[in-house]
Image (spheres, grey):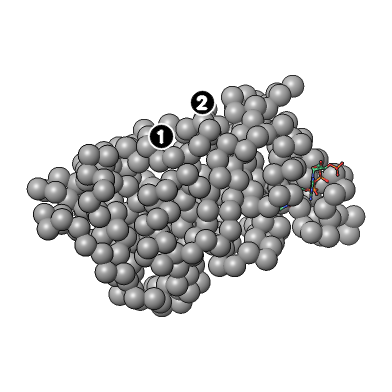
Amino acid sequence: MRVTVVGRLDTETLIEWNGALRASCVEDRVGVWWPSDETVLAQFADPLPGRRRWALVHRAEDGSLAGAADVSAGPGEPAEVTIGVLPAHRRRGIGTVLWEAARELLADEAPSVVQSETWSQAGVAFAECCGLAVGNSELRMLRSAVAPAPDRHAAADVEIVTWTGAVPDDLMHDWVRLNTRMREDVPIGELTRRVTSLDAEWVRAHEKRMTDQGWILVRAMARLAGEGVGYTVLFVAADGDEIVVQDDTFVERAHRGRGIAGLLKSENLRQLSALPASAAARWVQTTTAVDNHPMLALNRAIGFEVADRSYALEGRFAVS
Ligand SMILES: CC(C)(COP(=O)(O)OP(=O)(O)OC[C@H]1O[C@@H](n2cnc3c(N)ncnc32)[C@H](O)[C@@H]1OP(=O)(O)O)[C@@H](O)C(=O)NCCC(=O)NCCS
């Protein structure tokens, strides 16, 4: 059994690695967003500060890739492990060998918990076999990217500001505050929450990384009497992709139930349809926790339909 760690700048093998993970994790699911090779190369060339990441490959006898693992960890944060084994090579212990290799790599980091995500019952069974338990489950939903933006209304005093690219300087203070709340508030079931301390510098560094990875950020903020009370974000591939990713949507607790999230999402979809880079898009993809009933109801109301379900698992590594 041959497992190797791919070099951060080994472009050819990183592309092979990404292809093997994509093929084993996407399988027959419809309209799944997966990072492009360019995105992956940019991620490894400029890793997230304070977080280590390894690409592992397992080769078959003939040298072709049979499986791959994506492993990352940062001090005091949950480690993340995703394993993919190509269908022709399953149930021969390759997933287990990759898992053991990940465990050895992470021994130095000594993470308190490890998390993993899967979309299949095989993935859940495998991860449970590795000692993890389901801690959250999300529905992946798709909406046609060419359907007209829905008409939504909120109280007349709600103002929606939209823009693409960097957060305007005069909105930065509110942007940081709302993003921080979102991270504290978004339902994640039984999973350990990752603590990210956000500030303007973090936001600018994130914007640069996203641009380097080929993304256009399409965003909207809701304001009441000049103060930000909610926001939403779409990720659009600059070079055209079938999938647009609906990322965060957040409204401050005190202002929920007034139609603000719906208005934010509809205005941002309107902004998306006017963006030349979205011409190739077929689907907008979003994921929402199975118990996040308000957001599931809103997504359905604006034309999203459930495509499939994912499971996030968590456990403690018995670091030897
Ligand atoms: C999940 C996955 C990585 C397993 O890879 P694998 O090489 O087949 O796994 P192993 O052969 O090492 O299996 C180890 C154990 O996991 C469990 N398991 C694996 N696949 C299973 C399945 N389809 N049904 C039930 N149990 C399964 C079994 O207990 C198995 O032991 P056994 O074969 O002795 O019964 C592979 O099916 C895959 O790539 N799936 C799609 C991607 C995915 O879901 N990845 C997320 C997992 S982190």
Mark 2 lies on a secondary structure that is loop
The label shown at residue 196 is: 1
Where residue 252 appears, x then y in whole percent? 26, 42
Q: Quadrant of the N terminus?
A: top right
* Residue in front for this viewpoint, 101 or 29: 29
Q: Amino acid at mark 1?
A: Thr
Q: Residue at x 65, y 34 (%)?
A: 133
Say if residue 147 shows up in the picture.
Answer: yes
Q: In the rendered structure, which disc, 1 or 2, sits on the residue that comes first in sequence?
A: 2
* Residue in front for this viewpoint, 307 or 93: 307
Mark 1 lies on a secondary structure that is loop
Q: Vertical placement of 121 versus 238: above or below?
A: above
Q: Quadrant of the C terminus?
A: top right
Q: Residue at x 50, y 72 (%)?
A: 242
Say if residue 72 shows up in the picture.
Answer: no
Q: Quadrant of residue 89?
A: bottom right
Q: Residue at x 63, y 64 (%)?
A: 29
Q: Residue at x 82, y 53 (%)?
A: 90
Residues at badges 1 and 2 in contact (C-beta under 8 Å)? no
Look at mark 2 in the image and give the residue it sits on: 76
Where residue 75 appears, x then y in whole percent? 52, 27
